Image (cartoon, rainbow, N blue to C red):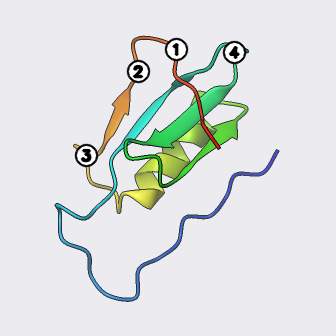
Amino acid sequence: MSSPTPAVPASPVSASETPHFVVGRDGRGCWVAVEIHGRAGGLFRTCQAALHYAVEATAHRPDAVRIAADRIELRI
């Protein structure tokens, strides 16, 4: 399973516009990365892959990615 490549904005994005992600496992045990407003996300084989996707999508902002304590779901 390949991970999707996040879109790169044409212009710099302010911190308030940068997406925030939650990474965790869904009910089937798959790793999920979900943007908190539902604008982006994906299913991943490993936690590392989900984190990589989320970190790239948030321009490496350390406060923009959180690990979920509970199960999360990717809604399409």
**Mark 3 or mark 4, which is nearer the start of the sequence?**
4
Residue 25, percent from left and from top = 58, 20
Q: Amino acid at mark 4?
A: Gly
Q: Amino acid at mark 1?
A: Arg
Instruction: Name the front one of labels 3 and 2.
Output: 2
**Residue at the disc numbered 4:** 29
**Mark 2 or mark 4, which is nearer the start of the sequence?**
4
Query: Looking at this view, is 47 or 32 the one in front?
Result: 32
**Residue at the disc numbered 1:** 71
How crowded pointer 2 is (Cα within 10 Å; few <14, some 14-19, many 20+) is rated as some
Residue lying at 40% horizontally and 88% vertically, measured from the top left: 10
**Residue at the disc numbered 2:** 68
State whether residue 10 is above or below residue 41: below
Residue 38, percent from left and from top = 47, 46
On-image quarter of the N terminus: top right
- Dot 2 and dot 1 residues touching (CB under 8 Å): yes
Instruction: Name the front one of labels 1 and 4.
Output: 1
**Mark 4 or mark 1, which is nearer the start of the sequence?**
4
Residue 49, percent from left and from top = 61, 41
**Mark 2 or mark 3, which is nearer the start of the sequence?**
3
Helix, strand or loop under label 1: loop
**Residue at the disc numbered 3:** 62
